[in-house]
Image (spheres, rainbow, N blue to C red):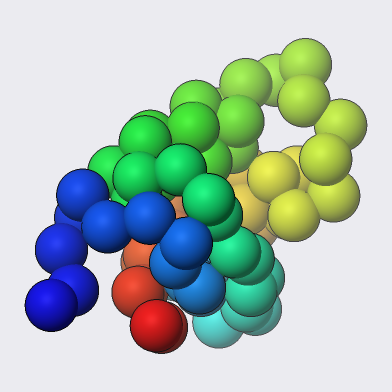
């Protein structure tokens, strides 16, 4: 069963402006990873390339999809 409390998940983040995708995998709960991604994308001090893209291109708006 897929839930947001599941661990070892494969996920995709899609930019809502240009539809660029980032594929990731997490060993933590999916809800925790979603929250961390959102915090990183909205953090102006984060130099992670996908985070910079999602912040600049779509103003922090993205779609988070559970793939596994």
Count every numbered label the image shows and give the total.
0
Residue placed at 85% from the left, 49% from the top? 49
Residue placed at 36% from the left, 74% from the top? 65
Q: Can you give x and y, in whole percent of width and height, for residue 66 in the image? A: 35, 74
Question: Given the current orientation, which residue lies at the most extreme top position?
Answer: 45
In the image, is 55 to the left or to the right of 7? right
Give above or below for 8 relative to 60: below
Quadrant of the rendering where the C terminus is positioned: bottom left
In the image, is 40 to the left or to the right of 45? left
Q: Can you give x and y, in whole percent of width and height, for residue 6 in the image? A: 27, 57
Frontmost residue, 41 versus 56:
41
Residue placed at 75% from the left, 43% from the top? 52
Residue 43 visible in the displayed image: yes
Frontmost residue, 28 versus 23:
28
Give above or below for 2 relative to 39: below
In the image, is 54 to the left or to the right of 65? right
Q: Residue 31's quadrant in the figure?
A: top left
Give above or below for 54 relative to 9: above
In the image, is 8 to the left or to the right of 24? left
Residue placed at 50% from the left, 73% from the top? 10
Quadrant of the rendering where the N terminus is positioned: bottom left
Residue 59 visible in the displayed image: no
Q: Can you give x and y, in whole percent of width and height, for residue 38 in the image? A: 45, 37
């Amino acid at each position: 069963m897929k839930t947001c409390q599941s661990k070892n998940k494969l996920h995709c983040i899609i930019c809502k402006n240009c539809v660029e995708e980032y594929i990731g995998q997490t060993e933590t709960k999916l809800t925790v990873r979603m929250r961390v991604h959102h915090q990183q994308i909205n953090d102006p001090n984060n130099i992670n390339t996908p985070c910079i893209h999602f912040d600049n291109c779509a103003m922090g708006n993205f779609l988070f999809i559970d793939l596994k």
